[in-house]
Image: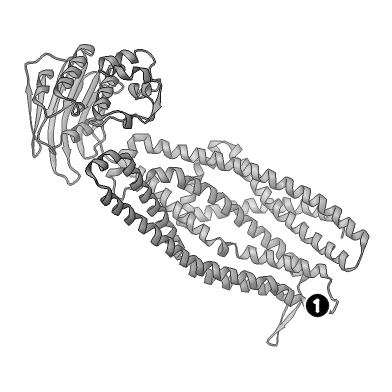
Amino acid sequence: MDWSHQLQDSLIWLGGAYAVSLALIAAGCFLAGRYTAWGGQIARLAWPYFSPASGWGRLATLAFLVFMTLFSVRMEVLFSYWYNGFYTAMQQLDAPAFWFMLSVFCVLAFVHVLRALLDFYVSQALLIRWRSSLTQAFIDRWLKNRAYYRSHFVEGSVDNPEQRIQQDVDSFVTSTLTLARGLLGAVVSLFAFTLILWGLSADLTVFGVEIPRAMVFLVYIYVIVATVFAVRIGRPLVRLNFLAERFNATLRYALIRVREYGESIAFYGGEAVERTHLLERFAEVIGNMWAVVFRSLKFQGFNLAVSQVAVVFPFLVQAPRLFSKEIALGDVIQTAQSFGQVQDSLSFFRSSYDEFATLRAVLDRLSGFSEAMGRADLLPAARIEDGRDLAIRALTVRTPAAGMLVEALSLQLADKDALLIRGRSGIGKTTLLRALAGLWPYVEGSVERPADSTLFLPQKPYLPLGTLRAALFYPRAEAGADGAEEILRLCQLGHLAARLDEEADWSRVLSLGEQQRLAIGRVLAVRPRLVFLDEASSAMDEGLEHAMYSLLRERLPGSIVVSVGHRSTLRGFHTHELELLGGGRWELVRMEAAAI
């Protein structure tokens, strides 16, 4: 065998196969994206990263991996010819040819190892960068326009968005690249080894009918029939994999809630109830796992049986020709290897069906997540305009069921004004604040307020993970270094001054009353023009509440304050009172009190 000609043929083959592969990939992507649901899903998720607008370097990396895939197939072809020459030399007891083939093997092995290492590095680098880009894109969309909150109001809201961002993005990137390269390699390998098998095959008479190049036709018929049956057996795995993702995410979320509300559960003694709920969700996980196991047994059992039969089939066909000395042992070995490569290539979809099923489930979850965020962006909201004061104009707030909470509310607050919103529980006070913040979608009207100088304090403050200093100055990114100790002292949290730079989950360290005082400290640190307090002192006694409101009046004399509360003692700190009466009715009263 002339290996210099093999090298020349390899260069020509790689160039031609590369050009044809790029054309087929482009055509396949276009047709899949246009005419199949899953193809369109992949296109929508992958295009932002690989589009030329994002830089040609990413496409160049992908093109290089395509070349490496074709290079891998060509290496398998060369190894096929090497096996033929090596076993033929052994059969003929040709020592010079034997040692020459060993030297050829050393060269092929070196190139193969180098190719494998380079391929691994480039593919992993692409996976990491693609996952980073896609994860960042999903996080940006999730936070933009407050979709993380507003998506709860859309029809068919998605479950466990954190899992979709963390786990499903990783699965999508890895599975898409792996299966795409596997499919390309299978197609090219099928073409290359079919040519080899065609040259090694002989005619075969079956039931009196002579089949030319029988080996090629038999392997195609064998695998196509097997694939049809495999698809029918494995089709339920798509739904089962989707359910596995959902059930596991639901169980994980339930466990997180037990951890977050551990103290409340302990006070109630609710361990038995929580155990029942957790085990019910765990039973769903286990039940689905058994369903996957039984379906996989059928699917994998069928695939294994098909593969085992394919191992001996080429030897059975070529053995008579070997014994009659029509072909050498090397030809038999190369036939068996080529038959196996053709069979594996044709069987790619069948053997990877469970992986395709998993990818389809991931695509459905990510596409559903993306669509939910898109629907959240389209939800209406009060028109928020930038201005110096607070001006509410013809604001109407409804429940999701179209019940009237507040109808045509109009008012204006300026320097030193303070508004107290009151009403019985459940009448819509907090919902009104959500509408003023632009969070509530079932609203009409407009709100003018200082866009960059407004702070909302909910009843249960949010304390980010990190240092106490960062929690105090949240949401200021710089976590202001000056004045923290003084603010803690003013808020009667001086005992925490020494722990300002300690990292902890402060929502577990501090009591609710301490958390609310820390939130008051945020107001002093940020010094907003307008501050909304949604029962932000409910966990304090009246003395502490009086001290905190007095602190706000003293330190922020020109700011506008809007409070939601039930205690009558709050009236002395507000200039206006808005009482919600139900059915959309309201009453606004100006009170005689010192303005904050």
Picture quarter with the C terminus: top left
Question: Which picture quadrant has residue 443?
Answer: top left
Asked if residue 288 lies left or right of residue 487, the reply is right
Residue 120 visible (yes or no): yes
- Identify the residue shown where x is 68% and y is 62%: 191
Residue 231 visible (yes or no): no
Give the vertical position of 148 relative to 416 (above or below): below
x then y, percent, for residue 172 = 50, 49
Picture quarter with the N terminus: bottom right
x then y, percent, for residue 356 = 51, 58
SS label for mark 1: helix
Give the residue pinned by disc 1. Answer: 321
Which residue type does callout 1 highlight?
Answer: Arg
Asked if residue 484 lies left or right of residue 240, the reply is left
- Identify the residue shown where x is 69% and y is 48%: 116
x then y, percent, for residue 393 = 17, 28
